[in-house]
Amino acid sequence: MKVVDVTVTPIAIPDVPLANLKGVHPSVFLRSVIEVRTDTGLVGLSETYGATRTLTGLQKVARRLEGLDPYDLRDLRVRVEAALPNAGGVNAPTALADHKVVDVVYSAFEIACLDLRGKEVGRPLYDLLGGAVRKTIPFGGYLFFKFAKQDLTFGPDIMGEVMTPDALVEQARAFHGEYGFSSWKVKGGVLEPELEVETMLKLREAFPGHGLRIDPMGAWTVPTALKVIDALGGTEAGVLEYLEDPVPGLAAMAELSAQTDMPLATNLVVVEFEQLIEAVKTDAVQIVLSDHHYWRGATGAVHLGEMCRAAGLGVSMHSNSHLGISLAAMCHVAAATPNLTYDCDTHYPWSTKEIVKGGRPTFRNGAVQVPEGPGLGVELDHEAVAELHALYRRAMVIDRDDTEEIRKYRPNFERKVPRW
């Protein structure tokens, strides 16, 4: 089986103004849909980021993949590195963490290769990763403070304005009713720390027994983070499962970790294997968020789990705005990662579109079943892709800039990290 052709299609999906430390989501989010065709007639699928630097990297590598054996991932890596020498960060200019473009592009094509291999041998992708330890994948509800959407040109709003603790609790109630989530992650760093503490306490009251986390994206100083931990009762009160990226940078995380028993998690300061080693040396984090989109694909994400097991660290799973191909890949990785013991993150409820046949998957009690077909177990809906590619061309958005977007709602907004 050899690769004969690769198609990379940029798409835009209607988004809503979800707030975070650096601003709000623009009117659309961007993805790239990848189809890798072989001389046997099989087509491998993948989905990844769609901003300019990612898209350019994907297109450069696509031209070099003719003749690739999908079983030869070493050769895939060589081709990616040859096409992208000295490649820098891949994320949009306002991102707080950056990932090497070679890792993101490799990850995208690795998923397509694994999909091909699974289709050829008739086995689900999780079997290629060592087998499934679970086939029902639990997800947590991802809660956001948000503005009411002003521009409805590309799609409707979801839930209107949510800018108070009580409104966020109501958002959680709505998600619980629709999806059955039994754990919650709040995107923090938006309101004053005291109001976000109030939010977490009200969520605890509304959902006793549910896991809770908050991710301020490095919005706080070490003293502020310690005050928040104290206000939430520390580890003894059991309000939080863990605190994700409360302070910016590995050094500040280590400083905070030395002063608290609260488990600290990250998807900002540990995004490469070299950083994991430094984090273990300094005891900066106790939990690392996996993500096959930048941890060198599905094999790299499973390898991360093994490294965390050896180091005594916990594993959770990160999410960005995504559609069904990525959701399927996330499920296969989660199925094959034994020590992924926390509910996975997902932005999925914040979109209404889908690009896989059969439409949007069903969440039951907050969980999704791993697709059981060969490879990823999903098929591409070409009409849906064409519709969203047309939106990409019409929207004329080629990068994500949350800071510029929030100035439509708060003209005097200034980005500041940390903010409190």
Image: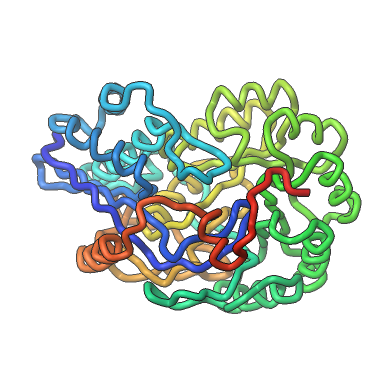
Picture quadrant of residue 65: top left
Residue at horizontal 68 percent and vertical 46 percent from the top: 416
Residue at horizontal 59 percent and vertical 42 percent from the top: 289
- Residue 112 position within the rendered picture, expressed as x and y whole percent measured from the top left: 28, 43
Q: How is the image coloured?
A: rainbow
Would residue 137 be found to the left or right of residue 243 on screen?
left
Pick the front one: 91 or 176: 91
- Residue 208 position within the rendered picture, expressed as x and y whole percent measured from the top left: 79, 68
Residue at horizontal 36 percent and vertical 57 percent from the top: 397
Picture quadrant of residue 193: bottom right
| As drawn, 176 above or below 77 | below
| As drawn, 87 above or below 297 | above
Picture quadrant of residue 359: bottom left
Would residue 42 be found to the left or right of residue 140 on screen?
left
Would residue 25 be found to the left or right of residue 391 on screen?
right
Pick the front one: 291 or 416: 416
Residue at horizontal 65 percent and vertical 57 percent from the top: 187
- Residue 284 position within the rendered picture, expressed as x and y whole percent measured from the top left: 73, 31
Would residue 362 be found to the left or right of residue 97 on screen?
left
